[in-house]
Image (spheres, rainbow, N blue to C red):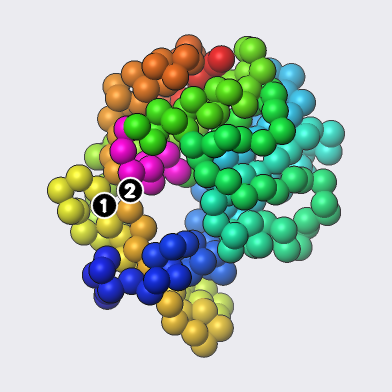
Amino acid sequence: MPNPGDADPVAAADPYAVLAPVYDAWTGWFADAAALRLAPMLARRGTQSFLDVACGTGRLLHVLRAGDRGMRLCGVDASPAMLAEARRRPNADGSITWRRGSMDGPLPEGPWDATGCFFDAVNHLPDDGAVLRAFCAARAALRDGGAYLLDTCDEGAFKPGRESYSGVGWSLRIRQRWDGRAMVAGCTVMHDGGKASCNVVERPLPPARVRALLQEAGFAVEAEEPDRSGGRTWWMAVR
């Protein structure tokens, strides 16, 4: 398994170029679970427009579209490879807008009724300053009274876990190590006869720190719900 310094230059620039072809098969369950949690919350708030930041392959937005044909939906991601997967999903019908961009903005085509950022995407930001910029960008994209919905992970989520995954035509091996401030996951993907490696880095974010940064960005935190699995917190903050 490569060390961070041995990573392929292309994968270092966009590690999700390595992960994108197998991402849904590997982690699609989380997008489905997040959509089940999110859809009734959006319905209760009468949400007519939703922006998913760090949308990845867009699976969550496609699930939302299947349940609501009228909502304006947009996904933003920094990875061209992930957006390419989003655009060519079998159920893609052109009704969802896709944009390339980073979590710390600026974000497109607001104001939005709600914005989201899921699968602990915020944990991938390099420091608290970047997290604050991301929260400020999300707030700037919202209408007054709009909701920002996200999940974050603290150290309880960074436990030794499953190291190998596989399906028809693909396999993924992950080796994790703690570097003193973040978890570095070295990933090797075998797909369609090819092999590629990358490194993905996540920092733990204690809930108290997330709450303070949301408030510093100008949000009112309305919900803070620990996940039953431990280590993950679901948030709703309102502009």
Q: Is residue 214 left or right of residue 83?
A: left
Q: Please tell me in which quadrant of the rendered image residue 154 appears.
A: top left
In the image, residue 11 above or below residue 196:
above
Q: Is residue 111 visible?
A: yes
Say whether residue 158 is magenta: no
Q: Which label is found at residue 202?
A: 2
Residue 142 point in image, percent of width and height:
63, 22
The residue located at (67%, 36%) in the rendering is 108
In the image, residue 125 above or below residue 110:
below
The reply to whether callout 2 and callout 1 are in contact (CB within 8 Å) is yes
Q: Please tell me in which quadrant of the rendered image residue 144 appears.
A: top right
Q: Amino acid at mark 2?
A: Glu
Residue 118 point in image, percent of width and height:
51, 40
In the image, residue 141 above or below residue 145:
below
Q: Is residue 80 left or right of residue 126?
A: right
Which residue is under mark 1?
183
Front in this rendered view, residue 166 or 100: 100
Q: Quadrant of the C terminus?
A: top right
